[in-house]
Amino acid sequence: MRKSWWWTLPIVLVALYFGINLYAERRVQKEVDNAIAEMSFFADVDYEDVDFDLFSRKASIKGVVISPVGEERRLSIDRVVVLKAKGEKTFFTRLHILFMGVRVESGEAGEKVAAFLDDLGYEPEEMKADIELDYRFKPEERDFRLKTLTYRVKNMGEISLSLHLSNIDLRDDALSLLLSFPRILIHEAKLSYRDDSLVPRLLKAMAEKRGISVDSLIEGITAEVERGISEEGEQIAAEALEAFRKFLEDPEEISLIISPKNPYPLRGSNGPGIRPNS
């Protein structure tokens, strides 16, 4: 009898797991449907399926299509993966989400982007983007940390932003947030771009259009930027120009880093602590 009980235990546990998982999946699907209903006045949203993993607590939505009301274009997303989500009904204080296989379909803007990338030699399947958003907001401390906002296209490049702000309340309405802008403090920020193939193709296309060599084009671009350097912050601008020139000559990665010794008002973020990196 005891042996029989031990043999059936794994079956019971598996059945229990799938039962709870199915319940959680349906609950997630209900929340997704409610969110879609709230968006219906400005966009139609469809999706194929919702998955939920009980162990990892990871929810994913497959085959998402967003069609703005009154427009021809639509946004297609292969998969939306919610890794972490905590907070109030109208605002997440902790969110880590992935948008995988993002592309704009039809519409004038989508056609122009497709034609532009086609001229650069990219295939249509290479035009899908992956977007990652990971942030944490502490309302009581009015502290916001954007761990990463990353936009990447395979074989093209990746741009990412991270920052730390304080004295900010993201629950405010748009006007209140705008008025509080001068009081927002920046602790650090980093904007980076890593290139896979986009910049060399852009430079080549621009040079061919002008009938000059790529080296001549780079010299012309850096000379034009240099002429625009003002006396204020001249040293920083000179460093930025040199980093930019090196990046054009050998495109790998370029970053702009803001790291003041003390928190600095956003309205004066062109002050100390800004440094380019290539």
Image (cartoon, rainbow, N blue to C red):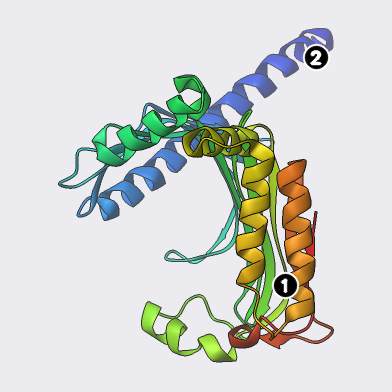
Residue 2 in the figure: left or right of residue 125:
right
Task: Name the residue nearer the viewer: 88 or 191.
Answer: 191
- Badge 1 amino acid: Ala
Residue 181, position as x, y percentages in the image: 52, 85
Q: Which residue is mark 1?
A: 237
Tell me where residue 71 appears, x and y as whole percent.
19, 44
Residue 174 placed where, x, y %? Answer: 39, 78
**Which of label 1 and label 2 is nearer to you?**
1
Q: Is residue 147 visible?
A: no
Above or below — where is 190 with respect to 24? below
The image's mark for residue 6 is: 2
Image quadrant occupied by the N terminus? top right
- The first of marks 1 and 2 along the sequence is 2
Specify whether 226 is left or right of 60: right
Labelled pair 1, 2 in contact (Cβ < 8 Å): no
Circle 2 sits in a helix, a strand or a loop, which is it? helix
Identified by mark 2, the residue type is Trp
